[in-house]
Amino acid sequence: MNVLKREVFRLVIISLTFFMVQCKSRQAINKDILKQHLSTEVTIEKVPYGMTPNGDKINSYKLKNKNGMEVGIITLGGIITDLIVPNKEGISENVVIGFNSLEEYLKPNPYVGAIIGRYGNRIANGKFSIDGNEYQLTLNRPPHSLHGGEYGFNRVVWKENEVKSGAVASLKLSYLSKDMEEGYPGNLQVFVTYTLTQENQLEVFYEATTDKKTVVNLTQHSYFNLSGDFSKTILDHEITLNSDKIVAINDNGIPTGKLEDLTHTPFDFRTPKTLGKDIEVKNEQLKRGNGYDHCWVLNNAEKGKTVTATAYDKTSGRLMEITTYEPGIQLYTGNFLKGNLPMREEGFYEHRTGFCFETQHYPDSPNQKDFPTTVLRPGENYKTKTTFKFSIK
C-alpha cells in the first residue's frame, strides 16, 4: 500500500513539473511574440538639440522602424538632419546632406533639409497681385524673391507634437505665419506632418488655412546622395521623371511662361538615365540653370499614387520612388555646392554631391495666368502629400 502511495505521489510530481515547464515555455513564446509585435512598430524619440541665440529651445526627433530606416528631424525649420536607409548589403547609411550641430544649421546654407514656404521657388521681382492689390515681398535674391524670403519657414522654430497610431509614428509640426510676414498677406496657419511607415516610406503631409487671400507653395529641400558616400558626386545616379515638359526659364531662373517639350533634349528622363549623361551638353536651358535646376511638369495620371520620379544608385542598390499630389517637381543637381559646407565627418560637401527633388507648384505661378493657381482663400484647406519610398533593386 505504501508502495502504491509512493508511486501515485511520484506521478503527481512528474505531472506538476511537466505542467510548470509547459507554462514557462508558453510564457517564453508569448514574450517572443510580444517582442516581435513591438519590433514591427515605428518608434519616436525626442532629445534636446540646443538653443538659438534668441533663447528658443530646439528639439530633435528620431523616427525609426524595424528595417533599419531612421529619420532625424529638428524643430528649427522642420529640417531633416538624417535619413538613414539600408543598402543592398543591409548596411544602414545616411543618404541626405546634413551637419553635426545646431550652430551649422543656424549659419547661412542652401536650405539644407528644410521645409520651404510660404512659397517654394522664385517669384519674379518679389511682386504679385490679388484682386488688384499688389504685394511686395522681401527680395532675398535681388531682384527676385526665393523660397519664402529672407526669413522663410526654413529659419523659424516650429511647435511640435508626437503622434503614435498603431505601427506608425509621426511628428506633426505647426507654425503661424502672421499677416504680411515677408510681405505675404494673411495669417497662415501651417502644419507639416512627417510620418515613417514599416514599408520604408517617409510621408510629408502639408496643410494650411488663411484668414485672407494669399499664395502658398510648400515643399521639402533635402539633398540626396543614395550612395551614402558624400565624397562622391550624384552624377551616376539613374533618374526617371514621369514628365513630357519642363517649365522654361530665363537667365534669372524665372519662368518664361512657356512649357517646353523635352523630347530630344537633355531634360528627357522618361526612360532611366544618369544625371551625368547630358548635364554638360550644349543647351540654353542647362546654361541658364548651371545644370539641372528646373521644374518638370508631372504627368499625374493618378495623383498621389502614380510614381512621378525615381532615383537609383547601382553601387548601393538603393531605389527612391516619389509619389505626390503636386503638379511639378524641381530637380536641382547641387550646382552651387562649392566645398564650403562641412560634412558630418571630415571634409566638405563639394560640387554636385547632392540633388534635390522638390515637389511643388510651378515657380512664379502668382504672375503666370496659365499656370495652376497657388491662391488660397479663407475657408479653404490647403492639403498636399509627397511620399518618398525606399527599397533595394
Image: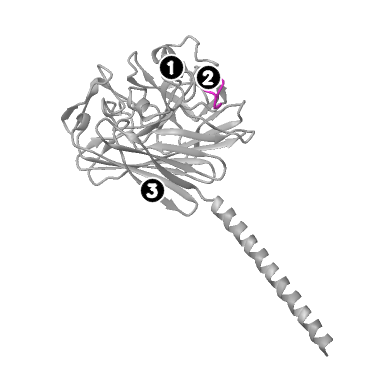
Where residue 231 is drawn, which disc sits there?
2
Dot 2 crowding, Cα within 10 Å, few <14, some 14–19, many 20+ = some
Q: Is residue 101 above or below residue 171?
A: above
Q: Amino acid at mark 3?
A: Glu
Q: Upstream in the sequence, badge 3 or badge 2?
A: 3
Tag 1 or tag 2, which sits nearer the N-term? 2
* Residue 13 picture quarter: bottom right
Q: The N terminus lies in which quarter of the figure?
A: bottom right
Q: Position of residue 35 (x, y in %)?
A: 58, 55
Residue at 53% x, 19% y: name it: 231
Q: What amino acid is found at the position of numbered circle 2 in the picture?
A: Ser
Depth check: give the residue in front, 255 or 117.
117
Q: Does residue 271 sit above or below 351 in this rendering? A: below
The answer to whether residue 370 is above or below residue 346 is: below
Residue at image location 18% in from the left, 36% down from the top: 179
| Relative vertical location of residue 371 with respect to residue 303 in this rendering, above or below | above
Residue under label 3, please give it: 162
In the rendered image, the residue lying farthest to the front is: 2
Of circles 1 and 3, the one toward us is 3
| Quadrant hosting residue 15 | bottom right
The residue furthest left is 133
SS at mark 3?
strand
